[in-house]
């Protein structure tokens, strides 16, 4: 029998054992009267995200050199809606005003990217450094810090210096590893004492597949047999180049992380990659299990497996064979554990249908995975709702499932949602400010995803530490030009790029306002 006076002692022992048993990384959720930022763990970062090429403009200022996206938009205007990013939304000149908008949203974090050709206009240091470019990012970062907004810096968001494209084909060549590492290392040493959160690469899967397998994004390379885009591609080799590009990119990541970890002024900082997986549900019984595992390996494991475990997923090696480059043992060692956190950009989910055979004569990333992407099951069920004008199906559970999947399969890492947002094409009403700001669909999208995120953190105990809405404001949406709007602020392109807060922006600001009764939505309504 337990004697009364021993009870406190026993309770103390239980408490100690519980604390020892609990993982230090496990999130501590808080009770809040209303669903709001107060429902999330203390210290969670709330922000918005952008990328240099999509917002800055000023492409000829401060000695900036051209990037491959400048070339792509000028050489193939028809592949980008006849739009370019020469002015974009003029963030280069208006960043102070835009930081006020971030304050108005009650955000405390901001994801930006550095444009490589703004720092090294010709791609490498020996060919010149742009002092103005370097200064621009100092000014921007200082202004953020002055406003108590924590920067998350992406070193590379797709704007390869054109000179490196011309010299050796950019990421198609192993030469990029040295040049990228030099550039990244320069940024770490220049800004590492001010910036503690870093991302080396944005969305390697999209960069390699869309640029070098499908040909939809710069540099627009693919084989002629690729549906829809093949007719536009002047050069390329689908089923080969994307794997080579990612191989070089992964090595560039690993060597640059080694440089980051050796950089004294970067001490206390962390660095990762921003991935962009979709979640997949099986389209039929035949697709349950292995096919879904395989497509997740292809879309996420391709880059997350090497940076966690040092090599590509076995399913990719089995399927792609000699077309998948191999890492040496030394490279595997440097790749392993080369990310301090996992960045995840989440937008949508799809159904995956098992394919019996690939197309060995006409290889491509998609057929290599032996999984067909579908937006409906054979019975006609949709993965989620797609409001009129919306770019993608809305399926917030996919985000929760992916977070749990990463926790379970990649060693329970720290994760940041580095992008999440709703894109729409307003069609004929593109320039109608009232329509553009009345974006209830975006507000619902954010609400649903934040509820799923809360479940991932508080119920599944996934270690998520930040959330960034894509995007602060409408901007240059790559091959969709300015037609697709993602912002919490509407840009009036006909009226001096005036910024207008949308309904979604107002909602996010309220959600983030300390103590504000933001919303009556409860889980059952999901
Ligand atoms: C949007 C998606 C459609 C698909 O068919 C495949 C997905 C579901 C995996 C998908 O998420 C692909 C996304 C792509 C191609 C691009 C992307 O995620 O880009 C990032 O998102 C922003 C909005 O598109 C973009 O502006 C930003 O620069 C990118 O980081």
Image (spheres, rainbow, N blue to C red):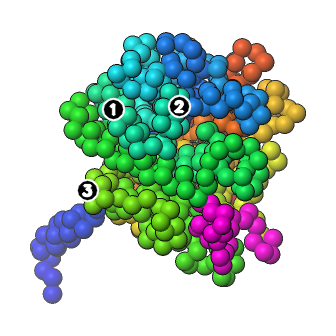
What residue would you read off at disc 1?
182
Separation of marks 2 and 3 at Cα, in angstroms:
30 Å
Do labels 2 and 1 touch, CB within 8 Å? Answer: no
Q: Earlier in the sequence, mark 1 or mark 3?
A: 1
Residue at 31 percent across and 24 percent down: it is: 190
- Within 10 Å of disc 2 (Cα), the crowding (few <14, some 14-19, many 20+) is few
- The verdict on label 1 being within 8 Å of ligand 1 is no
Residue extending farthest to the right is: 428
- Measured as percent of width and height from the top left, residue 272 is found at 38, 46
451 is higher (above) or lower (below) than 436: below
Q: Which mark is residue 88?
A: none
Q: Earlier in the sequence, mark 2 or mark 1?
A: 2
61 is higher (above) or lower (below) than 84: above
What residue would you read off at disc 3?
330
What residue would you read off at disc 2?
166
- The verdict on label 3 being within 8 Å of ligand 1 is no
Residue at 67 percent across and 22 percent down: it is: 499
Q: Which circle, 2 or 3, is nearer the viewer?
A: 2
Residue 146 shows up from this direction:
no
- Measured as percent of width and height from the top left, residue 137 is found at 43, 21
Quadrant occupied by the N terminus? bottom left
The residue range painted magenta reads 352-380
- Measured as percent of width and height from the top left, residue 424 is found at 74, 41
């Amino acid at each position: 029998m337990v004697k009364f006076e021993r009870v406190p002692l026993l309770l103390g022992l239980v408490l100690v054992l519980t604390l020892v048993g609990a993982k230090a990384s496990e999130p501590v959720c808080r009770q809040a009267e209303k669903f709001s930022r107060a429902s999330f763990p203390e210290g969670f970062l709330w922000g918005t995200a952008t990328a240099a090429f999509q917002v800055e403009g000023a492409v000829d200022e401060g000695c900036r050199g051209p990037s491959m996206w400048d070339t792509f938009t000028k050489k193939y205007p028809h592949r980008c809606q006849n739009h370019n990013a020469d002015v974009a939304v003029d963030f280069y000149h208006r960043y102070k005003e835009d930081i006020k908008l971030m304050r108005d949203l009650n955000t405390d974090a901001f994801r930006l990217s550095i444009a490589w050709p703004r720092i090294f206009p010709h791609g490498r240091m020996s060919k010149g450094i742009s002092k103005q470019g370097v200064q621009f990012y100092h000014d921007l970062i200082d202004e953020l810090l002055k406003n108590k907004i924590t920067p998350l810096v992406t070193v590379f968001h797709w704007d390869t210096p054109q000179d490196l494209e011309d010299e050796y084909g950019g990421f198609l060549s192993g030469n990029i590893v040295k040049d990228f590492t030099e550039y990244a290392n320069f940024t770490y040493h220049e800004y590492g004492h001010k910036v503690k959160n870093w991302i080396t690469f944005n969305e390697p899967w999209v960069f390699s597949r869309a640029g070098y397998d499908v040909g939809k994004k710069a540099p627009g390379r693919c084989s002629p047999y690729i549906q829809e885009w093949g007719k536009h591609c002047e050069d390329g080799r689908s089923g080969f180049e994307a794997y080579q590009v990612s191989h070089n990119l992964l090595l560039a990541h690993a060597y640059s992380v080694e440089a980051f970890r050796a950089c004294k002024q970067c001490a206390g900082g962390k660095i990762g990659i921003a991935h962009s997986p979709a979640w997949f549900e099986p389209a039929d019984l035949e697709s349950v299990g292995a096919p879904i595992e395989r497509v997740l390996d292809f879309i996420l494991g391709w880059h997350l497996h090497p940076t966690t475990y040092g090599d590509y997923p076995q399913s990719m090696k089995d399927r792609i064979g000699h077309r998948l480059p191999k890492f040496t043992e030394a490279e595997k060692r440097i790749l392993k554990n080369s990310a301090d956190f996992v960045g995840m950009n989440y937008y949508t989910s799809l159904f995956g249908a098992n394919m019996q055979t690939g197309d060995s004569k006409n290889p491509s990333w998609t057929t290599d995975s032996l999984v067909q992407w579908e937006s409906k099951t054979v019975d006609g069920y949709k993965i989620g709702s797609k409001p009129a004008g919306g770019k993608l199906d809305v399926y917030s559970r996919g985000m929760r499932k992916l977070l749990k999947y990463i926790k379970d399969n990649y060693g329970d890492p720290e994760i940041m949602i580095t992008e999440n947002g709703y894109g729409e094409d307003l069609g004929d009403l593109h320039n109608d400010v009232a329509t553009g700001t009345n974006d209830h669909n975006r507000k619902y999208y954010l609400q649903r995803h934040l509820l799923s995120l809360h479940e991932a953190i508080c119920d599944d105990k996934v270690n998520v530490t930040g959330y960034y809405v894509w995007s602060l404001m409408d901007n240059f949406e790559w091959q969709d030009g300015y037609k697709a709007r993602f912002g919490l602020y509407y840009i009036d392109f006909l009226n001096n790029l005036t910024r207008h807060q949308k309904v979604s922006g107002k909602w996010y600001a309220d959600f983030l306002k300390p103590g504000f009764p933001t919303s009556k939505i409860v889980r059952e309504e999901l």
